[in-house]
Image (spheres, helix red, strand yellow):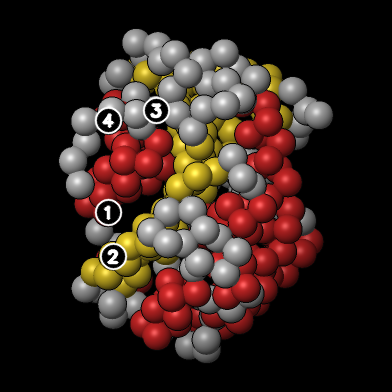
């Protein structure tokens, strides 16, 4: 089992940010500056083409750390951030750019590429969770959530389906291809986001994926707008969701 190695530390705005590696996978762990004793952990999955310190990741982590007192961890997906691209990565990205330039459907390429990334990333996330739970401020028996949109959903759904330590999740904005059977194996509470006027992912496809989840508690958030109009206030809703499901006596309101 790979051990966690901290490589840098800084603090600002009520949070401590620690860069780490687990094997050759780089990540960042954000925690309350005041110190949190056995606080819940939320794993964040970044979007396609982004990385562990993308502003969206930093913003969501800040809300969870300062609003709930949680720890939040993000790792770079294969071929993203500080991780080198393989020849296969370059080929898939080139095909995606060609399809976009020609106005052709990009879904089949994204679905295929993301499925490959998920195969690699799921065991990496599990190794990272193993290592993080060795930290005394997190512990092996604390609540764990997962929050990922786009590529974060393509990787997060297979992860949640096989990882019993994750007990609540937020997903959204992903094609259902290759994920429908996975959704049927997910039973934890979920919140699912889609854009009603998404020009990339047909509305019916998003609704079908939501319907496929086996969770007894699942909530659909549909917002007007196109794919990249995904509203920032959904992050606030995710914080309230995790406060309900991971906290004991949390103060967030529904």
Q: Considering only order in the chain, which callout, 4 or 3, is on the residue closer to the N terminus?
A: 3
Q: Can residue 4 be seen in this view?
A: yes
Q: Which mark is residue 250?
A: 4
Where residue 251 sits: x, y (%)? Answer: 21, 30
Q: Please tell me whether mark 3 or mark 4 is closer to you in this view.
A: 4
Q: Which mark is residue 70?
A: 3
Quadrant of residue 76 within the rendered picture:
top right
Query: Do the residues under discs 1 and 3 have CB atoms within 8 angstroms?
Result: no
Is label 1 in a helix, a strand or a loop? helix
Q: Please tell me whether mark 2 or mark 1 is closer to you in this view.
A: 2
Q: Considering only order in the chain, which callout, 3 or 2, is on the residue closer to the N terminus?
A: 3
Q: Can residue 46 be seen in this view?
A: no
Q: Which mark is residue 234?
A: 1
Query: Do the residues under discs 2 and 1 have CB atoms within 8 angstroms?
Result: yes
Query: Do the residues under discs 2 and 3 have CB atoms within 8 angstroms?
Result: no
> To which residue does mark 2 refer?
221
Where residue 215 sits: x, y (%)? Answer: 46, 62
Crowdedness near tag 4: few (<14), some (14–19) or many (≥20) residues, C-alpha within 10 Å: some
Residue positioned 57% across, 21% down in the render: 139
Left or right: 223 with respect to 118?
left
What is the spatial separation of the Cα atoms under label 2 and label 4, in whole angstroms?
A: 22 Å
Where residue 181 sits: x, y (%)? Answer: 62, 73
Left or right: 29 with respect to 238?
right
Residue positioned 28% across, 21% down in the render: 13
Is label 4 in a helix, a strand or a loop? loop
Q: Considering only order in the chain, which callout, 4 or 1, is on the residue closer to the N terminus?
A: 1
Quarter holding the N terminus? top right
Residue positioned 67% across, 66% down in the render: 115
What is the spatial separation of the Cα atoms under label 3 and label 4, in whole angstroms?
A: 11 Å
What is the spatial separation of the Cα atoms under label 1 and label 4, in whole angstroms?
A: 19 Å
What is the spatial separation of the Cα atoms under label 2 and label 1, in whole angstroms?
A: 8 Å
What is the spatial separation of the Cα atoms under label 1 and label 3, in whole angstroms?
A: 18 Å
């Amino acid at each position: 089992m790979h051990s966690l190695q901290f490589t840098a530390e800084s603090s600002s705005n009520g949070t401590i940010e620690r860069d780490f590696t687990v094997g050759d996978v780089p990540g960042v762990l954000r925690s309350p500056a005041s110190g949190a004793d056995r606080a819940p952990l939320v794993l964040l999955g970044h979007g396609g083409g982004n990385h562990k310190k993308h502003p969206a990741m930093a913003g969501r982590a800040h809300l969870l750390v300062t609003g709930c007192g949680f720890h939040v961890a993000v790792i770079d997906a294969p071929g993203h951030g500080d991780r080198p691209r393989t020849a296969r990565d370059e080929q898939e990205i080139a095909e995606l750019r060609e399809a976009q330039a020609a106005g052709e459907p990009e879904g089949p390429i994204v679905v295929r590429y993301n499925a490959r990334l998920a195969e690699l990333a799921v065991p990496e996330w599990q190794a990272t969770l193993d290592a993080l739970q060795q930290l005394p401020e997190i512990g092996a028996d604390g609540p764990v959530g997962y929050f990922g949109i786009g590529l974060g959903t393509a990787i997060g759904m297979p992860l949640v389906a096989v990882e019993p330590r994750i007990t609540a999740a937020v997903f959204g904005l992903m094609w259902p291809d290759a994920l429908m059977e996975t959704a049927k194996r997910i039973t934890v509470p979920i919140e699912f986001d889609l854009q009603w006027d998404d020009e990339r992912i047909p509305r019916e496809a998003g609704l079908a994926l939501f319907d496929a989840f086996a969770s007894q508690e699942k909530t659909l958030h549909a917002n007007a707008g196109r794919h990249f109009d995904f509203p920032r206030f959904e992050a606030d809703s995710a914080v309230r969701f995790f406060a309900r499901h991971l906290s004991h006596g949390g103060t967030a309101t529904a």
